[in-house]
Image (cartoon, coloured by chain):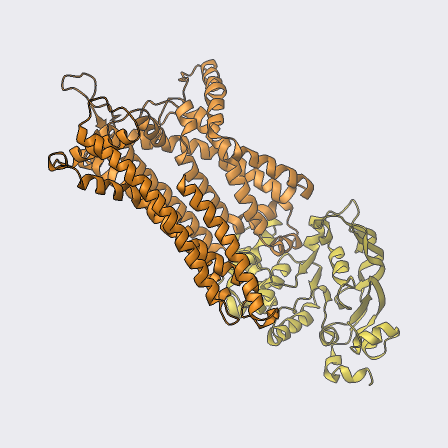
Chain colours: A orange, B yellow
Amino acid sequence: MQLTVLLIILALLTVIGYQMGRSRAVASVGGRIVELHSVPSYHGFYVALWAGLPALLLFAFWGASEGWLVMQMVLSGLPDRLVNGDAQALGLLRADILNLAHGVATGREPDPEVVAAAERYLRLHALGDWSLLVIGCCIAIGGLLYARGRIDPDLRARNRVERTVNIALVICSLVAILTTIGIVLSLLFEAIRFFAVVNPLDFLFGTHWSPQMAMRADQVGSSGSFGAIPLFAGTLLITGIAMAVAVPVGLMAAIFMSEYASPGLRTWLKPILEVLAGIPTVVYGFFAALTMAPFVRDLGNSLGLSVSSESALAAGFVMGVMIIPFVSSLSDDVINAVPQSLRDGSYGLGATKSETIRLVVLPAALPGIVAAIMLAVSRAIGETMIVTMAAGLTANLTANPLDAVTTVTTQIATLLVGDQEFDSPKTLSAFGLGLVLFVVTLTLNMVALRVVQKYREKYD
Amino acid sequence: MSVQTHIPATAMASRPAAGIHGTKMVARDVKVFYGAKQALKGINLEIQENRVMALIGPSGCGKSTFLRCLNRMNDTIENCRVEGLIALDGEDVYGKSIDAVQLRARVGMVFQKPNPFPKSIYDNIAYGPRIHGIASHRDEMDEIVQTSLKRAGLWNEVKDRLREPGTGLSGGQQQRLCIARAIAVSPEVILMDEPCSALDPIATAHIEELIDELRENYTIVIVTHNMQQAARVSQKTAFFHLGDMVECDDTEEIFTNPRDERTQGYITGRYG
């Protein structure tokens, strides 16, 4: 409640600050704006920033530390017999206090000391909120008055505002980078825990995947074997099938769009093809599981082949269709970037259109096309839903596209679905798989980027 | 100021036309439209065998458009329409008996900006002969590549690095590579669209010498903005202005004694 009030007050103060700064700057030179170092609006922003930012920083700091601070104060007031436990007991105590304070039943008769502590917690919390409101308003008003007092024709308000904006931009990009680092680290730590239980060599080169662990010592049929080769093979097989569909079709479509289609047709065709990229993969999954897989099975049966109803072929084919727009759209851009002068040179020698495309345009566009294909491959490797729905979960080590196979991503999804115990190698193996996947796709992306960079400016 | 003072006397000493030159190409009432806009308003021109014809005129006057009609390069431009007759050895190039691909093998083209393919020097030259199946085995192809490079005056500079990319050559070398590439398919006519405008003076001098030598075996039509160049390399000059062909005569005549006052204005530098 108080926080909302504070935010509204802050918003009001920044608006007031802007107007104040502006009008004061204009007044300071008697309306002759050219005499100001910065235009009046920068003075306005300058005051507004001073009014809003310090209070906002306090607000953020408070939000991050308030709960911990209040809890420390409450705990320090408790008798030693309650506080002197190990880390787990202390955590339990904290949870009890919080639950009581928020009126959640703990399921057992609470210690009167703990009840008192919960009340203290609530009191301190309310006090903290009020003091935040008061302190926040004071800081905001103080900042506003300070900045207003500094307004002067020579004040370099523009430079200061620009610098603040600059810092804000840096912080935003840092958020993205830090998030990535955080994801990688969390993946890495869990994977290390997994590899402490399972030998990395067994994991990378074992040929039997059966992650079920025995919960009791006498449980049957749960071997807990973590050889990931069948998963890698399955991923490779499905990716291979997908690329066998996507690369020729996508490339031909790109050639048609950029070289043969009239501009009018192209403006229609390209967006329609890109709609394919906008279809959720779950929907592709329906299509693969309900239409493609039975079709492949029936077709195989009529040819006398035994096809399982969940086949790598169906999943790979649908995945290939999904990837077509990636290949075609990127390749189309690359082909369009080949200078017209090269085409003219070829036509001028009496080459036909297809000779020109085959012998001049495609070789010139090749680096970009390779990069497009690599991006498509990493997309295919990371795809989960279609495979989960259409290729099954059986970890077969097979090269037969008519069998059911499973992929790394599918296994990760199944391993982490539902309630999981995080001390079991079964769950942790997901992170091992994730790490391998991450390394592979990262390598592919980096190679693709390198290829593009290396050849980008060569023919301009 | 007299007209003559603009043209150095030595520049006029291009080789006198020897013997009788047959007509290689004829344009009759050629009109070109880009959409609704008319770029050429009925051009009549005769191009003589084994001579260099220069097309001069201010920017946007249609000389490049006309050049690109001669080997139907305008076909590759959307909504470009050509009317009238253009004949090569008496055959209508827009007629049924000849198609653009055959025509361009007979009427080669060199462009304003050097545009070597991103291939090796050897493959650049061999490109045309390969697609037309001119050479039946390797030795023959080597022979064609060597002759073409020699004729283009590039052989001595590149003979040790035929496998290196053509894009690695200097601008002037690249342009001579493009000329060699055009020669390799043994065309009858070579069209040059401002072939020296992207080159430095020394490379330009090289190309000009080359053009003069090529005249023995080929018919050449060159578009140029540089009037000294037209005077140096050509025997015939046609002056284009606003989509019209104003005047066409022996080069010497055009530069010393232009009949039309627009021609005179242009070559004395009053506009253009």
Residue drawn 41% across the image and 17% down it? A307
> Residue A158 appears at what percent x and percent y?
51, 65
**Above-or-below relation of B261 to A395:** below
Residue drawn 49% across the image and 69% down it? A155
Residue drawn 27% across the image and 24% down it? A105
Q: Is residue A226 visible?
A: no
> Residue A54 appears at what percent x and percent y?
40, 55
Q: Quadrant of residue A200?
A: top left
The one of A74 and A186 positioned closer to us in this rendering: A74
**Quadrant including the C terminus of chain A:** bottom right
Q: Is residue B12 left or right of residue A189?
A: right
**Above-or-below relation of A253 to A318:** below
**Quadrant including the N terminus of chain A:** top left
Q: Is residue B240 left or right of residue B136?
A: right
> Residue B182 appears at what percent x and percent y?
64, 59
Residue drawn 66% across the image and 58% down it? B186
